[in-house]
Amino acid sequence: MNPATKQKVLSWSILFFLVLVWGSSFILIKRGLVYFSPLEVGTLRISISFLVILPFVFARIKKYNLKMQLIFFISGLLGNAIPAYLFAQAETGLDSASTGVLNSLTTLFALLAGLLFFKLKIKIINIIGVIIGLIGAVGLLTVSGGNSLNFNLSYGAYVIIATIMYALNINIIKYYLKEVDAFTIAVMAFFYIGIISSVILFTSTDFYWQLKSDPKVFEGLLYVGILAVLGTIIALILFNYLIKITSVVFSASVTYLMPIVAVMWGIWDGEKFEWFFLVWIGLIIVGVLLVNTKKPVRTKLNWFLTRARDKI
């Protein structure tokens, strides 16, 4: 297997792992909200992540100047801290499947941010893929959860803001932190936001008193802990690495496949699902394939016809 093929296999392997892990994060948020408020879920998620990365901070923090430290802070704020709260707040009105579907907007905003601020070059077929994928995402959102699109979007606004922040962060990592390894980006980003989140958690919430008075809260702590370690730290390190070895659009396209996993968890949890939902899911899959196409459609079609002719 040549290096290019190995990198392609590695890229898709990371992509599907992230789809599985992040697609499951919405049901974990839902479970956490049974025991904690949205603010507690968000700050607890970041604070646990902070504790995990803390031993690795001190060997790295002196290596970077003030400008780089600021970029790490902004990356952590946009890519983790604020979205962690916004997603928890969104799920007080949306079911986990709908939240996962709306998260697919990240790809569109990543594309727009790249075009507007980072001089990203893309092909028409990639834009078509984004549009098709979004049609599938909006269609699935319209029929999922048993509520109207207007109802879903009233809470979905939190997710929309979060996806815009995700999109900006993807481009920041790609263009301003390209010389920094993926693990260091995660460590430094969580160091600053972790301090802030921990202060908020213990000064502005009832988390500490809940732990002392209600043993059942530890079950909620387990859900948020899994979300923090597996769905935040480990997944973020892999995602940062994926951004470095692929394109911005490819990295962001993980959000197109996440809704499928989120919907599957929703079905398991008794959320509404109908057979025609598969039509919208199919559009999402087609969209993600087109978004990640580097060759023109005509080239791909000629390749396919040539292969077919050779087999006849």
Image (cartoon, rainbow, N blue to C red):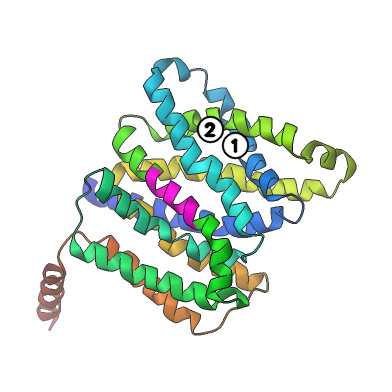
Residue behind mark 1: 49
Who comes first in sequence, dot 1 or dot 2? 1
Pick out the residue farthest to the top. 62
State the image coordinates of residue 191 (x, y, percent, origin top left). 54, 28
Please tell me whether residue 205 is drawn above or below residue 61 in the rendered image: below
Closer to us: 184 or 127: 127
Magenta part, dominant SS: helix
Mark 1 touching mark 2, by CB under 8 A?
yes
**Magenta stretch: includes residue 139:** no
- From this viewpoint, is residue 9 visible? no
Question: Which residue is painted at 32% across and 64% down in the image?
Answer: 130
Is residue 69 shown left or right of residue 53?
left
Mark 1 crowdedness (10 Å alpha carbons): few <14, some 14-19, many ≥20: many
Which quarter of the rendered picture does the C terminus lie within? bottom left
Residue behind mark 2: 190
Mark 2 crowdedness (10 Å alpha carbons): few <14, some 14-19, many ≥20: many
Question: Which residue is painted at 47% across and 19% down in the image?
Answer: 61
At label 2, which amino acid type do we have? Phe
- The magenta region covers 160-168
The residue tagged with tag 1: helix, strand or loop? Answer: helix
**Alpha-carbon distance for marks 1 and 2?**
7 Å
Question: Which residue is painted at 48% across and 32% down in the image?
Answer: 189
- From this viewpoint, is residue 158 visible? yes
Is residue 172 shown left or right of residue 21?
left
State the image coordinates of residue 58 (x, y, percent, origin top left). 52, 18
State the image coordinates of residue 123 (x, y, percent, origin top left). 18, 60
At label 1, which amino acid type do we have? Ser
**Magenta stretch: includes residue 165:** yes
